[in-house]
Amino acid sequence: MTKLHLKKRKRFFKQIVLISILVPLVLLAFSLLRFLAFKFFNYDLFSDLLITVAVAVVLVTTGYKPVDFAVLWLVRHVFFRSHVNGQIALSHLAHEAVTILNKYELANLIVNTIADVYCLQSASILLVEREKKVYRIVSAYGVKPSSWKHVEFPEQHPLIELLRTRKLPIDQSQIQKIFSWQDANKLNHTFEQLYASYIIPLMFGDELIGSINLMTTGRSKLHSSQEMRCFFDFSREVSKAFRNAIIMTDISDANQQLMRLQTELLHTAQRSAIERLATGLAHEIHNPLTIISGKAQILLLKRDQKAYDTQVEDVLKTIVKQTKRAADITRKLLMFSESQQSVKSLLDLEEIINDTIALLSYQVSLDRIQVLKRIESPIPKFYGNIGELREAFLNLFLNAVQAIGQEGSIQVGLRYRERERLIELSIRDSGPGILKENLNKVFHPFFTTREESTGLGLFVTQQIIHGYKGKIIVQSEEGKGTSFTVELPVRHEKKSYEGNVVKKDMPGPVKATR
Amino acid sequence: MKLLIVDDEVEICDFLKSFFEERNYEVRSATSGEEALKAVEQFKPHVVLLDIKMPGVNGVQVLQEIKAKFPKLKVIMVTALETRDKIEECLRLGADNYITKPLSLEYLENDVREKIEAVTNSSSA
């Protein structure tokens, strides 16, 4: 009977039942005794207080044991019923587990459910990471994340070897009997690291996938060997689910990494191609421009001696000015491709937008696209990487220009939403709009509806904006156009360490920040 | 006031040469890196205007050799367009200024004069 453990709530309930049965029973027995004593001995039990108390105590002590036994029997039925419920919950869980293909999600579900069903103090799941050849805790209940996040064991760790060879649950209270004194000591330490008193291996064939680690307390319902066996069966079922989830998680991680690398590669290739193009182009264009402009400047410098009429002077000035303008376009092209390496500084977004529009002005005028700019000054300076922001804006503009094709308008808006401390950039085009089913795909890498596009522009833009904890929202109406809204949070206070680094690198503009 | 102009584009060398000669500079020009290095040894200019992109020995290599042999010689890099990395490399190697084409002749002349004055002042002092 002493082995029977009840929940606190149930123990309290048991006491109430016990008292409510015991008190009337004792009173009844006392009245009977008094009646008998009076009838046969003509003695009133109430006449002496001492005797009254003594009789009551005798009655209570003799009555307690049988009543307690009866009540416990009753309560045990309630307890037993909930235990059956626990088994049902486990078997449901085992079925559900197969459908979950993310190992973290699966581990969380199992840890939380078993801890609840068995009233455990703590529970955790150790899973293999094949690539790194380690076993790591992926989820835990009842332990602070900071204390389990770093727990990992190499493949050669004694515990891992032991679980792999024994393939059976290990009970901390039994290790002294099974292992030598030294080995038991070492294992005890491992149990502490895992916050466990039981470690149940998760096996798939001969492969050790991981383990379920439990810490029971007095009120936990995992003590009888039958309960343990039941739990071990459950762990065998779940092993299959874990194996599948591990494989799926690995595949999806690898897939994501591949996608990211592919994007990066294409992006860098694109950028270095632009760089080569810009510098090569500049060599071919700037040299003749230098000669044209230089000769015009020489003539202009001689104007005092030669006394040109004003028309000639104007022409010469125009030549100098326009050659500079022509050179600016390749310079801007290079400026836009040189991005990632640049350091962060305080930026004037209005200027960046004007630069971007200037870069596209030729194409825009060729396609008869009107650009309407609406900038609500003042716009606060934005702390960021100039190359990244140029690239993000350029991608949005290019997208708008390409969406319109021929004839239309682009509305560009820039304003500061003071209360939310957000800089808002909106670019609205009068293009054909985006099909509803494509709307949530526009930011996916390699998604494009145009043959000549790589489908990276908007993806890269989104990555950049997210890098600044900003948001990018797309709205579109078929036949009417599309608008992209970018919200960039203005950070007024910078973390001190960041400030220090930046101040060292760029003494000029950063001093202005608060 | 001796000036060496290095550019693989003959036309550019020619008009810069006549521009500076009219302003009483003694000017030589070179159209390749090899030629430039020879001219530096023989002509001993005060300032070199040096193009970066040239076939054969390029401007950066010329700059390196000049600064190794004549650390006091002023070198102004003149280039069409270069990446920031290239510009930083030149400045690290000791280039005294960096000017992009198309050139503003007024600015260029001022800069050349300043550099020559700095050299002649320090050597006479």
Image (spheres, coloured by chain):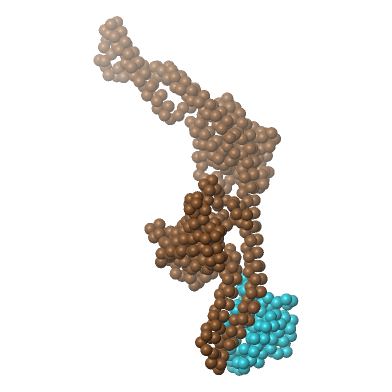
Which of the image's four quarters has the C terminus of chain A? bottom left
Q: Nearer the viewer, residue A352 or A111?
A: A352
Q: Nearer the viewer, residue A258 or A232?
A: A258
The image shows residue A82 at horizontal and vertical percentages of 48, 25
Residue at 68% x, 39% y is: A161
Give the color of chain B as drawn.
Answer: cyan
- Up the image or down, B101 lies above or below A124; here it is below
Q: Nearer the viewer, residue B116 or A155?
A: B116
Query: Which quarter of the figure has residue A201?
Result: top right
Query: Which quarter of the figure has residue B62?
Result: bottom right
- Up the image or down, B86 lies above or below A60; here it is below
Q: Residue furthest left?
A: A47
Chain that the image shows in brown = A
- Up the image or down, A97 lies above or below A496; here it is above
Query: Position of A400 compared to A20: left or right?
Result: right
- Up the image or down, A461 lies above or below B123; here it is above
